[in-house]
């Protein structure tokens, strides 16, 4: 059994990379991921990436923040310590608006930060997994999982036919405890 975990096709040109994606998809080869040094328009549609659901999470965190502070202010000003200031009612909703707005923004900001870290596995202190360091500089990389049923030579040929400058086989690194 081969130790190859990923087959990486490195490209100089984004158009060649898009051609490589087309070649792999026509041959029904599943693509693990694509790494680019800059945003490429249309790549999400080509890869079938769905729209993010982070907006729903932001709405839920905002509702949670508004509910928490509204409950705290209501309990404090109406039940725990009601004050009669100039004959105004204790439960005046316009008085609650600034606190509610600020806590809505606060909960949304912190909630989205934690959600982003959880969704991307980029917790502080965790080293990012980079397939090829040149993908952060000037190369466009297509990573194909080598565990599929397609022979490695066929994948290599498809990538080279699309204009890959280099095709690498990443191998598993086994840790020795000796």
Image (cartoon, rainbow, N blue to C red):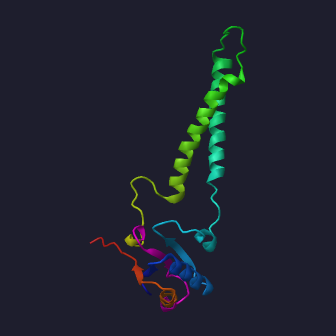
Residue 94 visible in the snapshot: yes
Identify the magenta region: 135-154
Q: Is residue 91 above or below residue 154?
A: above
Vertical position of residue 53 compared to residue 143: above or below: above
Identity of the residue furthest to the left in this view: 178
Q: Is residue 74 visible?
A: no
Q: Nearer the viewer, residue 114 or 139?
A: 139
Q: Is residue 143 above or below residue 113?
A: below
Q: Quadrant of residue 11?
A: bottom left
User: Image point 66% across, 51% down: which residue?
Assistant: 56
Relative placement, left or right, of 51 versus 106 is right
Q: Please identify the quarter of the rendering in which residue 78 is found.
A: top right
Rendered location of residue 164, percent (x, y): 46, 84
Residue in the picture at 56% in, 45% down: 111
Residue 146 lies within the magenta run: yes
- On screen, residue 98 versus residue 154, left or right, reads right
On the image, the x and y values in percent for residue 9 come to: 46, 81
Residue shown at 41% from the left, 67% from the top: 136
């Amino acid at each position: 059994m081969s130790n190859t975990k990923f087959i990486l096709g490195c490209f100089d040109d984004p158009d060649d990379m898009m051609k490589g994606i087309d070649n792999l998809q026509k041959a029904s080869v599943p693509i693990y991921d694509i790494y680019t040094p800059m945003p490429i328009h249309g790549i999400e549609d080509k890869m079938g990436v769905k729209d993010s659901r982070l907006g729903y999470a932001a709405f839920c965190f905002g509702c949670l923040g508004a509910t928490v502070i509204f409950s705290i202010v209501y309990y404090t000003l109406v039940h725990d310590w009601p004050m009669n200031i100039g004959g105004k009612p204790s439960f005046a909703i316009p008085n609650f608006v600034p606190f509610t707005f600020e806590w809505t923004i606060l909960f949304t900001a912190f909630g989205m930060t934690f959600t982003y870290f959880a969704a991307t596995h980029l917790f502080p202190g965790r080293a990012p997994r980079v397939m090829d360091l040149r993908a952060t500089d000037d190369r466009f990389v297509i990573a194909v999982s080598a565990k599929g049923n397609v022979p490695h030579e066929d994948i290599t040929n498809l990538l080279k036919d699309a204009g890959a400058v280099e095709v690498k086989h990443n191998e598993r690194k086994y840790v020795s405890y000796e």
